[in-house]
Amino acid sequence: METVETNSVSLKRPHSEDDVANADEIKRQKTSENCKTETNSGQSIETVTEQPAKSLLEDTKNEIIPNEEGEEQEDEELEDGDDDGDPESFADMMKHGLTESDVGITKFVSSHKGFSGILKERYSDFVVHEIGKDGRVSHLDDFTVPVDDEDPSEETFTVLSDEDKQRLEELQLLKNKETSVAIEVIEDTKEKRTVIHQAIKSLFPGLETKTEDRDGKKYIIAYHAAGKKALANPRKHSWPKSRGSYCHFVLYKENKDTMDAINVLSKFLRVKPNIFSYMGTKDKRAITVQEIAVLRITAQRLAHLNKCLMNFKLGNFSYKNHPLKLGELQGNHFTVVLRNITGTDDQIEQAMNSLREIGFINYYGMQRFGTTAVPTYQIGRAILQNNWNEVMDLILKPRPGAEKGYLVKCREEWAKTKDPAAALKKLPVKRCVEGQLLRGLLKYGMKNIISAFGIIPRNNRLMYIHSYQSYVWNNMVSKRIEEYGLKAVPGDLILKGATAVHIEEGDVHNYTIHDVVMPLPGFDVIYPKHKIGEAYKEMLVADNLDINNMRHKIRDYSLSGAYRKIIIRPQNVNWEVVAYDDPKIPLFTTDLDKLEGKPLPVLPTDGKFRALKMEFSLPPSTYATMAIREVLKMDTSIKNQTQLNTTWLR
């Protein structure tokens, strides 16, 4: 099932040294991301000294988030001064956000008494390791490059000056009218000329080279082999037949989402992002480790990028004959720290034992529904109702709560003028959903909202209707548990292979709650044969939708439906309570720490604060925060976590 990640809101912590440090770090990171590809400066990677929480709860989930091949990703939103303010004012703004009960998340399965704790106070408190289809957990533990006689020498990466690289890049990308670039060979030898030829061809795919004599001097001439068609395409004739076409590697990243990382890599390598493949995207506000494959880029070139990339590292290189496919993963392994916990040792023991033995309700987490006063499921419902004026209004109208200053101005302009051009002028970031819709309205006119909405990338459009499906599913599961508890009952659904069947009266003893599934509404699913089946129909009728007709006149918005387990029991559950004094110190070592030989800080036996370190593995399409919610018995919404964290700040 296809899902799309939504952005979450950031909490600023003003008037502190951490803010100044973080602002400086953002500048350094931008400088790093703009550094010349495969520079010869010898700059080494700089791992950011992490700041306390900027986003309290960017819901980490085990979901697969597909991206259509070649589709551009939305630009990261710009920082805006209007977001700054004291924690109280931010918490006040978040009063307009969603809570769990707003999206049907109301039940728990365990009987222990809940306690409080802070999730993601630091992004390094949340570490995700991908589990491949073979059950192997991805780790970054090896920087060595496979030895290959076909690889160019290390000198290939340093022989060209920054000025040469700039001119070659402009030629490669057809940014000027020059048809060739001439590079003078200083200290002319055949070996030196060979290295320059290799450097240009390997670093700038699509360019060919030749040697010319000019005024008694030797020049290497670079030119396009076959015009635009050759741009950034891997060179078939330069790739050894004995080597697998795909370089697989482990991507370790901090505080950056998967597509951002791939976009940065593609810029440095001067290739298109769609030559990279992966099994699933990973959260931004976390440290994550996952496998990536790239077509016909050598491990040597990738390893060289470690010298200038910030916030991520590449390693564990190997060559294989296949790319990676979305959904091939078995799941993810999570290592989570909940800081400043209040529970007793007995409460924590009960909570964690319950998580291991019973599990948690497989709700769709808060991130599925957006963070502003207009939930994504409302837009999805309007799409399914074919109410396009409502869709336009929900996306563009002014809304209370925390938003970027330029979005507020754009919405105000839209409300005042209903002029797409005027509203668009207020947006410095044109690739946000609002900007894309306004561009569509400008192109197709106010009377063709369907076509205007179609300018938004397909995955983002489908996000809205999937959010509505999730909203219905959450509400129905809460009703199912309220009505029948934690046992299988006649009329429930279970899966036999990929087919859903009802549990009959005589078979009910053969099944437990862990076997029961519930449908996401659609034209290709069946519903429970008890009160909850009727509840589905009633909920959709209240939303002016017909459960028996979930096909839409626009094929993309037709819902086939799917089945989802009610209860998930995590695997490999372990936990430990630790004491600490300094909220800024890490409480466990990462893969990168181990590679760099960093010791774990010595923790006091009786510190000011206590933290719960927990580990568990989850299958795809499950939300880690819903597991944590079951442990804490706390609302995991940004609205609630913001209020908790602003109290903690005092």
Image: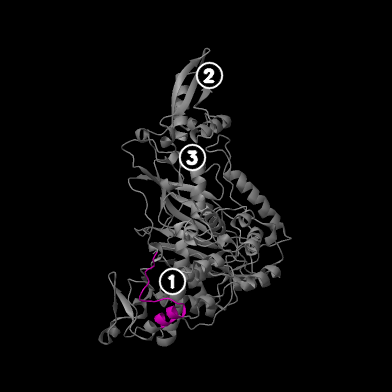
Question: Image height check: is 256 above or below 379?
Answer: above
Of tags 3 and 1, the one toward the viewer is 1
The stretch in magenta equals 535-553
Residue under circle 2?
Answer: 187
The picture quadrant where one finds residue 600 is: bottom right
Give the structural element (helix, strand or loop) at label 2. Answer: loop
Question: Image height check: is 192 above or below 553?
Answer: above
Q: Is residue 537 magenta?
A: yes
Query: What's the mark number on residue 469?
Result: 1
Q: Say if residue 364 shows up in the picture.
A: no
List x then y, in percent, for residue 203. Answer: 47, 35
List x then y, in percent, for residue 18. Answer: 69, 57
Marked residue nearer the N-terminal end (2 or 3): 2
Question: Image height check: is 337 above or below 533?
Answer: above
Q: Residue type at mark 3: give it.
A: Arg
Q: Is residue 618 magenta?
A: no
Q: Which of the image's four quarters has the N terminus?
A: bottom left
Query: What's the mark number on residue 270?
Result: 3
List x then y, in percent, for residue 621. Answer: 42, 66
Q: Residue type at mark 1: give it.
A: Gln
Q: 252 or 611, which is in the foreground?
A: 252
Tell me the CA gap for discs 3 and 1: 40 Å
Of tags 1 and 2, the one toward the viewer is 1
Marks 2 & 3, CB-CB < 8 Å contact: no
Tell me the CA gap for discs 1 and 2: 68 Å
For label 1, count other residues whose C-alpha is less than 10 Å away and answer few (under 14), some (14-19) or many (20+).
Answer: many
Question: Image height check: is 394 above or below 507?
Answer: above
Q: Say if residue 45 shows up in the picture.
A: yes
Q: Residue at x 48, y 40 (%)?
A: 269
Query: What's the mark number on residue 43?
Result: none
Q: Residue type at mark 2: give it.
A: Glu
